[in-house]
Image (spheres, helix red, strand yellow):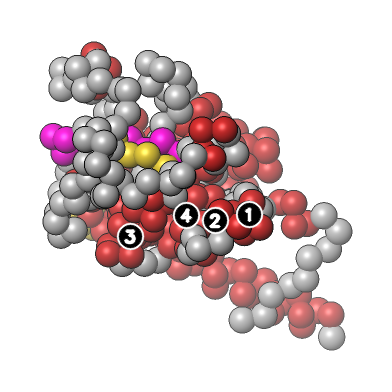
């Protein structure tokens, strides 16, 4: 595949994970694996979204939810390695995890390694004999929300916002947070300000579709297994959404059912986008000759 060059400030159009240089330059973190450093940058990125959404515990500390499965998806690794990387970050004091139990995903606290408290010697939480920390790994074959470890935090399991009766994060809220992050909605809104309403409609449509309990979903006139559709939608990114917006803007035919049009466009985006841009590149190259 042939890619074009960057011209001027075109590189600024993309979003990036920010990995602190200190993780590579500070002697304290030299033994930390490159994959673990990359994961820390990904968790930092997620934390900024949690902060904007007001995800704070009663002590005012920001927390995130990032399951082992999401680590696997982000880094393209197996369950065993994803678990190892989370443990590695924990051993270096870069994250803390709070196991809530009852099938609920862990809360993860991304630690500020530049603060004074992080300059204390790192403890391997498996060998900590203080009696305040205990790690228990569950069977990796179990559901993604159970692939967690225990650590000590000041959040109480009896706090009303974490109680069974008032679970603070519903299935829909989890999906909204997931798509806000995976689709880089903030970036899309900056790049496509005229499409703000459409972007929010797309996010709502994705959330509604993935939250459904139906076994099949109608896409482009065909009934497809809901799990297949859900998997396809949860692998979409900002580039796919920009492609759908582009197709929508260039479509001159009347759209009778906008919901079905968007569902079909979103479902087919991963396969059609590459072919579209490859054809466009071939056309541009041919015109330059």
Mark number displayed over residue 84:
3
| Residue matched to label 2 | 29
| Residue matched to label 4 | 39
| Residue matched to label 1 | 26
Q: Position of residue 179 (x, y in %)?
A: 43, 42
Q: Quadrant of residue 231?
A: bottom left
The region drawn magenta spans 101-110
Mark 1, secondary structure of its residue:
loop
Q: Residue at x 19, y 51 (%)?
A: 137
Asked if 219 appears above or below 279 in the picture, the reply is above
Q: Position of residue 128 (x, y in %)?
A: 28, 44
Mark 3, secondary structure of its residue:
helix
Give the mark nearer the N terminus: 1 vs 4: 1
Proximity of marks 1 and 2: CB atoms separated by less than 8 Å: yes
Q: Position of residue 209 (x, y in %)?
A: 31, 42
Q: Position of residue 269 (x, y in %)?
A: 47, 60
Q: Main secondary structure of the magenta part?
A: loop
Mark 2, secondary structure of its residue:
helix
Give the mark nearer the N terminus: 3 vs 1: 1
Question: For this view, does 69 lie left or right of residue 198?
Answer: left
Mark 4, secondary structure of its residue:
helix
Residue 34 visible? The answer is: yes
- Label 3 Cα neighbours within 10 Å, binned few <14 / some 14-19 / many ≥20: few
Q: CA distance from mark 3 to mark 4?
A: 11 Å
Q: Nearer the viewer, residue 190 or 61?
A: 61
């Amino acid at each position: 595949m042939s890619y074009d060059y960057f011209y001027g400030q075109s590189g600024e159009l993309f979003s990036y994970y920010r990995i602190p240089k200190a993780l590579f330059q500070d002697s304290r973190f030299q033994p930390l694996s490159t994959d673990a450093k990359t994961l820390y940058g990904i968790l930092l990125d997620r934390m900024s979204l949690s902060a904007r959404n007001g995800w704070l515990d009663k002590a005012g500390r920001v927390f995130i939810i990032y399951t082992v499965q999401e680590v696997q998806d982000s880094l393209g690794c197996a369950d065993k390695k994803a678990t190892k990387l989370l443990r590695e970050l924990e051993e270096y004091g870069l994250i803390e995890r709070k196991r809530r139990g009852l099938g609920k995903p862990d809360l993860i606290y991304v630690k500020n390694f530049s603060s004074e408290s992080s300059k204390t010697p790192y403890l391997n939480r498996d060998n900590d004999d203080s009696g305040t920390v205990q790690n228990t790994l569950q069977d990796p074959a179990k559901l993604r929300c159970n692939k967690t470890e225990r650590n000590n935090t000041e959040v109480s399991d009896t706090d009303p916002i974490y109680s069974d009766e008032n679970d603070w994060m519903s299935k829909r809220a989890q999906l909204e947070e997931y798509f806000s992050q995976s689709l880089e909605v903030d970036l899309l809104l900056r790049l496509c300000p005229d499409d703000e309403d459409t972007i929010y409609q797309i996010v709502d449509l994705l959330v509604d579709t993935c939250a459904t309990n139906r076994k099949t979903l109608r896409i482009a006139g065909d009934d497809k297994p809901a799990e297949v559709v859900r998997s396809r939608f949860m692998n979409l990114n900002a580039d796919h959404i920009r492609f759908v917006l582009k197709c929508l803007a260039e479509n001159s035919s009347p759209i009778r059912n906008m919901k079905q049009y968007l569902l079909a466009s979103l479902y087919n985006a991963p396969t059609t986008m590459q072919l579209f841009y490859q054809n466009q590149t071939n056309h541009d190259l041919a015109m330059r000759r």
